[in-house]
Image (spheres, rainbow, N blue to C red):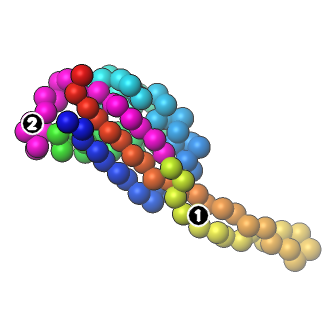
């Protein structure tokens, strides 16, 4: 039985978040947690919280053994984009796109 977690509107670009999600895809949950603890990226903390939430959901359901869980799927989708303007030379302005991500994590038993 699968355990799913969705985290939406994360204020980090999907490209940066995918770098971290590629590290833990397919790993056992214990290995993924230790990998995320020692990864020096901002997205690692966000993914760690989502992973711990999924593990907590699996414990509360009671039908899954937490020791046999592994990260079945992790994917990051692009969310909405905040558009801001930055003043430039000669009275012009350029757009600054502040991108958001949607994180999806699925855990399953081996």
Give the residue at the far front of this rendering.
1
Residue at x 46%, y 28% (from the top left corner): 23
Mark 1 sits on what residue?
Answer: 81
Residue 28 quadrant: top left
Q: Residue at x 64, y 69 (%)?
A: 83
89 w.r.t. 20: above or below: below
Residue 63: mark in rendering = 2
Magenta stretch, residue numbers: 59-76
The percent position of residue 31, horizontal first and vertical second, equals: 32, 22
* Residue at (36% x, 41% y) in the render: 105
The disc, 1 or 2, on the residue closer to the chain's N-terminal end is 2
Q: Are marks 1 and 2 in contact (CB under 8 Å)?
A: no
Q: Secondary structure at mark 2?
A: loop
Residue 35's place in the image compared with 77, above or below, is above
Left or right: 61, with 33 as reference point: left
Q: Quadrant of residue 87?
A: bottom right
């Amino acid at each position: 039985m699968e355990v799913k977690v969705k985290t939406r509107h994360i204020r980090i670009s999907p490209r940066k978040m995918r770098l971290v999600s590629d590290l833990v895809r397919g790993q056992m949950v214990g290995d993924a947690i230790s990998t995320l603890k020692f990864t020096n990226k901002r997205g690692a903390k966000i993914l760690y919280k989502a992973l711990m939430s999924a593990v907590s959901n699996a414990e509360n359901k009671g039908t899954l053994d937490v020791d046999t869980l592994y990260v079945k799927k992790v994917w990051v989708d692009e969310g909405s984009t905040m558009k801001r303007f930055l003043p430039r030379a000669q009275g012009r302005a350029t757009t600054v796109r502040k991108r958001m991500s949607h994180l999806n994590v699925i855990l399953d038993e081996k």
